[in-house]
Amino acid sequence: MKKLHGIELGAGTAAFLDAPQRMMIGGQRVEAVSGETLPVIDPASGEVFCRVPAGDAADIDRAVAAARQAFEAGEWSRMRPVDRERLLLRLADLLEANAQEMAELEAIDNGKPVTMARHVDVALSIDFLRYMAGWATKIEGSTMEVSVPLVRDREFFGFTRREPVGVVGAIIPWNFPLLMAAWKVGPALASGCTMVLKPAEETPLTALRFAELVQEAGYPPGVLNVVTGLGHTAGAALASHKGIEKVAFTGSTEIGKLVGKAALDNMTRVSLELGGKSPVIVLDDADPAVAAAGAAQAIFFNQGQVCTAGSRLYVHRSRFDEVVEQLSGIAAGMKIGPGIDPGTQIGPLVSAVQQQRVLGYIDSGLGEGARAVAGGTAADGMGYFVRPTVLVDTRDDMRVVREEIFGPVVVAMPYADLDEVARRANDTPYGLAASIWSNDLSRVHRLIPKIKAGTVWVNCHNILDNAMPFGGYKQSGIGREMGRAVLDLYTESKSVVMML
Ligand code: NAI
Ligand code: MG
């Protein structure tokens, strides 16, 4: 029996943590070529609880070669769509059978509340793999009537094929480690690609366990390879690798630009899902209690480490005090604790670096004249905790209003009319998401087209669906994941013209 923070871990979780961690390359569990390892830290205590291989360029080379071999020559390259569907369904079933273990690993590794890990991260990953399994048999081309000006006496036939793009390099962040892996693996495997996945150095564990489940499901070796390692070594080697056809990246806008430039040099296809500073807009007809609860969920879910976090709250001035007071009450009442404790509502941030970054933002806001009506400090204990924080008296030019904080910190601001709030909501380099809180259909519909964001929620926030394309306007990224749209990212279109 293994305990962490007084909570007994499941047998599967304990066994996984006790075994030496290995990467997955060509179906083999391997150490890094260099033999080096990286520590994995429990963010609720700051203690190292296991180590993973520190893969670098040499490991990326091996993994790309294995993925290339599987893509070109192996059993996978000849597999029927219906068999790709069956394998993805089997993988989803295995994930479901191991759901509690996955949730515990995620909670320990990332710090997030285990209940959220189970019912959000793991549950959504299972659903998404099943959703993508269905697409394996529904990837279609078109037929065209061809008009040829010179050759009038012959008939022509034109059609398009959708072909897998090839070897995919996926680089993912630490905020939803398993779910971000699923978002890349699902469409890649549905469309017949092979891949190399590099999880974030802060949270490598569920990707390693997931790679074992992929082998257990019966995927041929080399279809999914996982290399753990740092961003500027393993990540950079993958993004700039000449042997891959596509890079799928989720993470910061800063690194996304580097990855995009590296990819462009090789003309590698690239999709980028980056940061955000999403507005939550409360109209004057909204119920203040509903709006406050919604705003709390929008910013405090996952400790605010969400690309779509509702980090700027705009409330009509007639409702401002009421909404802010209720929001502050919710913030102050949230139970802070280690993620593995089922009673925890707010876990630690993922790392000491992230905690310092978030506290630094709070201090910069306070230094410029903002006031914390809830939180504003680290919570007690050794872990990387930050109290749920509500800042008021902010100005639109402050860093806390302009930059992505990626922590449980919201800036709340009053506004006077709809044109003003639309302008201020769009006054950001980002464009990932927004939410509008109102039951006035006409005003809501007038506002929706004005908001420059890839997703607009009405009377909800952070609701994702497999069928809904997801991605950003402006500096929030390039491309749309999920839904039918994601297939465009993982396939090439080939036009065929035949003279009959
Ligand atoms: P990051 O963008 O550095 O990390 C994301 C992934 O990129 C990780 O797997 C990392 O190893 C990899 N990476 C780092 N440098 C790389 C490079 N030179 N080439 C290729 N891959 C590289 O994000 P980080 O530093 O962990 O967080 C910084 C800020 O980024 C956060 O405070 C937050 O604002 C934002 N962020 C946004 C995320 C989102 O979902 N949109 C996720 C994570 C962070
Ligand atoms: Mg970084």
Image: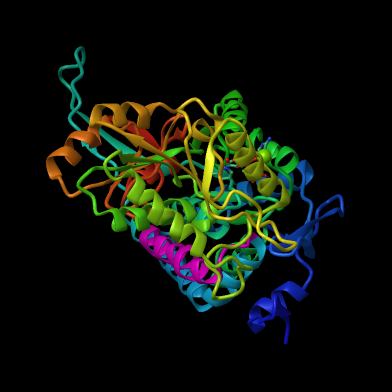
Can residue 214 be seen here? The reply is yes
- In the foreground, 201 or 452: 452
Q: Residue 368 in the image: state x and y as whole percent.
A: 58, 30
Which residue appears at 35% of the width and 50% of the height?
Answer: 323
Q: Residue 297 in the image: state x and y as whole percent.
A: 42, 57
The answer to which image quadrant residue 123 occupies is bottom left
Q: Main secondary structure of the magenta part?
A: helix
Q: Residue 35 in the image: state x and y as whole percent.
A: 87, 54
- In the foreground, 216 or 197: 197
Q: Residue 127 in the image: state x and y as whole percent.
A: 40, 65
Classify 58 as above or below 333. Answer: above
The quarter of the image holding the C terminus is top left
Which residue appears at 71% of the width and 37% of the height?
Answer: 237
Residue at the far top: name it. Answer: 150
Q: Is residue 472 magenta?
A: no
Q: Is residue 111 magenta?
A: yes
Residue at the far left: name it. Answer: 442
Q: For this view, does 237 lie left or right of residue 329?
A: right
Quadrant location, ligand no. 2: top right
Magenta residues? 110-133
- In the foreground, 309 or 490: 309
The answer to which image quadrant residue 213 occupies is bottom right
Which residue appears at 65% of the width and 44% of the height?
Answer: 359
- In the foreground, 203 or 8: 8
Which residue appears at 75% of the width and 60% of the height?
Answer: 41
The quarter of the image holding the N terminus is bottom right
